[in-house]
Image (spheres, grey):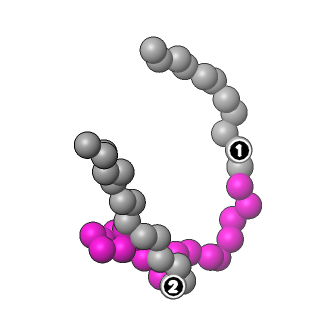
Amino acid sequence: MSFVVEIQPEVLPQTDNSVGIDLGIKTFATFSNGTKVDAPKPLKKRI
């Protein structure tokens, strides 16, 4: 199934804030502001 939606783009206010993102294996993502996102753990099936 697919569908198309037409919307008007939302204009966001310009800021001087920026952040860098480092993608890794042990830690999924680390941002330059110190925020870390853990890597997702796959669910294990019980036999």
Q: Where 29 sits versus 8, above or below?
A: below
Image location of residue 45, percent across then percent down: 30, 45
Image location of residue 44, percent across then percent down: 31, 51
Residue 18 covered by magenta stretch: yes
Residue under numbered circle 1: 10
Residue 39 in sight here: yes
Mark 1 and mark 2 in contact (Cβ < 8 Å)? no
Label count reads 2
Q: Look at label 1 and name its amino acid.
A: Glu
What residue appears at the point 71 percent right and 44 percent down from the top-left corner?
10
**Magenta segment boundaries in residue numbering:** 12-32
Residue under numbered circle 2: 34
Q: Secondary structure at mark 1?
A: loop
Q: Look at label 2 and name its amino acid.
A: Gly
Q: Quadrant of the C terminus?
A: top left
Q: Earlier in the sequence, mark 2 or mark 1?
A: 1
Residue reaching furthest to the front? 47
Image location of residue 32, percent across then percent down: 48, 82
Q: Which of these two is toward me, 30 or 26?
A: 26
Q: Where 15 sits versus 9, above or below?
A: below
Q: Secondary structure at mark 2?
A: loop
Q: Which of these two is toward me, 35 or 5?
A: 35
Residue 42, quarter of picture = bottom left
The residues tagged by marks 2 and 1 sit, at their Cα atoms, a distance apart of: 29 Å
Residue 20 covered by magenta stretch: yes
What residue appears at the point 67 percent right and 29 percent down from the top-left corner?
7
Image location of residue 27, percent across then percent down: 36, 74
What residue appears at the point 46 percent right and 70 percent down from the top-left corner?
37
Q: Residues within 10 Å of mark 1 (few under 14, many from 20)?
A: few
Q: Is residue 11 left or right of residue 21?
A: right
